Image (cartoon, helix red, strand yellow):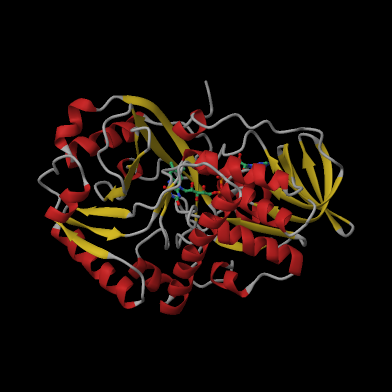
Amino acid sequence: MASESVSYWQRTAPVFLLSTDMPHSVDVAVIGGGLLGAATCYWLAQAGVRAVLLERTALAAGATGRNGGFVRAGTAGSYPQAIAHLGQETANAVMEITYESRALLRQVLQEEEIACDYREPGALQLAITEAQGEQQRREVETLRTDGFSAEWLDRAQVQDVIQTPLGPEILGGRFLPGQGLVHSARLVHGLASAALRHGARVYQADVYELGRDGNHVRLRTSQGSLSAQTVVVAVNAWMSKLLPELTRVIMPVLEQMLAYEAVAPIFPTAVSVNINAGEYMQQTPSGNILIGGCGFVAPNAGIGVWKSLPTSVVQEAIEQVLPRIFPSLASKLRVMQRWAGLLGCTTDMHPIVDYAPTLPGVIFVGGFSGHGMPFGMRFGQLLATAVTSGYLPPALSPFRLDRPSLERWELP
Ligand SMILES: Cc1cc2nc3c(=O)[nH]c(=O)nc-3n(C[C@H](O)[C@H](O)[C@H](O)COP(=O)(O)OP(=O)(O)OC[C@H]3O[C@@H](n4cnc5c(N)ncnc54)[C@H](O)[C@@H]3O)c2cc1C
């Protein structure tokens, strides 16, 4: 039985051939061919560093190639939740980082001529209960007070955005203007190609183990041994396999999606709704609607799972979402593809960037908790600075391992 499903993004991205004739020694090795690995390698190459990117199977094989393609500024939870976890000042700084990241994304896509369907139509979160509406209105107020754009749309205004009749439950929604949508696999391919043009190398190599070898880090891989001065581990959900001390700090959690065959334009923006604790969808420029979420219909079943395979209970729940919120769409929807991916989750839902506690020369980044796209470009740039300067830039302080809100996972 297959241990991996294939996503819409993976199926619609061109093939990217990885070479296998890996050298024995490099200055910097970046492990993981998702957004974080590709972005870090890109910025290292831009800075003139001799860097290699090592990916176990194919670029965008992990969460990046399987996601919803939302590039929504801010943290995984709401802004008020971030304030509760991190405090006002840090939550604000985290928000700023994601806006900086979006500006970098725009800049790099233009400079490197990367075609990945990137657009900024905004993100609409629908409210289907009075309590959700109240919560969203409060969030809009808090965001605006802190200088970020956000609007509350009433039902009629939401109907102006959605080009199909709304279901009766929809009361309105929180709209965040300018938020992005992207073809995630093409983005990673484009960044890796740009990194190659700037002198980096990209190899297919499964890294089995990290250790010390004198002043260097030794990597035991499927392509033989490699020695590097510095290693950046960007394997997200798989972190504990390479850095066992992070077991129960970054936990793999299964998340699922499906794609419908193309239909006429229905919604230009990112859309999310909270039926089973967070469902999200985008319609691609080709007309396919991609929708995911519903993990909470099988509580705990996805925690600690390693295989990216869809399950019928969650897929059936996902299939009920669109007919419920936009009933007249129901007869037009035909599922064309189902897939699953692994999130790397932390208990406070914020990513971690830090030095590996027991392995000098190793920096790791991960734990995006289902929300890594808005951080990728800026984190990659900050990680490249950490490598070249020898210290973690202060902008990464809120994401370190010793923050008070971060706990260890208790397994059910
Ligand atoms: C279904 C789903 C929907 C999501 N939707 C969104 C969304 O809409 N917006 C958003 O912001 N976030 C979303 N996310 C989360 C987002 O995709 C991640 O936060 C982000 O892609 C993390 O990027 P990454 O590069 O850290 O990790 P990944 O993309 O997971 O990349 C890690 C890479 O490391 C490789 N690897 C692992 N172990 C090794 C090894 N030992 N040696 C070599 N290579 C190795 C893997 O093959 C993989 O390619 C979603 C995730 C999923 C699964």
Q: Is residue 316 above or below residue 114?
A: above
Residue 146, relative to residue 71: is it above or below?
A: below
- In the rendered view, does 32 fall on the left or right side of 215? left
Considering every residue shown, the one lying at the far right of the view is 214
Q: Outermost residue, left direction?
A: 168
Rendered residue at 22%/49% (across/down): 161
Question: For the point 77% across and 57% down, which residue is it?
Answer: 48
Q: Is residue 189 visible?
A: yes
Question: Which image quarter: residue 382?
Answer: bottom right
Q: Residue 263, located in which quarter of the rendered image?
A: top left
Residue 93 left/right relative to 15: left
Q: Is residue 5 visible?
A: no
Residue appearing at x 51%, y 65% in the figure:
100
**Quadrant of res 59:** top right
**Which residue shows up at 32% across the image and 60% down it?**
176
* Percent position of residue 235, x then y: 61, 47
Q: Nearer the viewer, residue 207 or 188?
A: 188
Q: Position of residue 195 (x, y in %)?
A: 69, 47
Q: Position of residue 66 (x, y in %)?
A: 48, 38
Numbered disc total: 0
Query: In the visual, does 102 lie left or right of 283?
Result: right
| Spot occupied by residue 8 in the image (x, y as percentages of width and height) | 44, 32
The answer to whether 326 is drawn above or below residue 397 in the figure is above
Instruction: From this view, report whether residue 215 is shown above or below residue 274.
Output: below
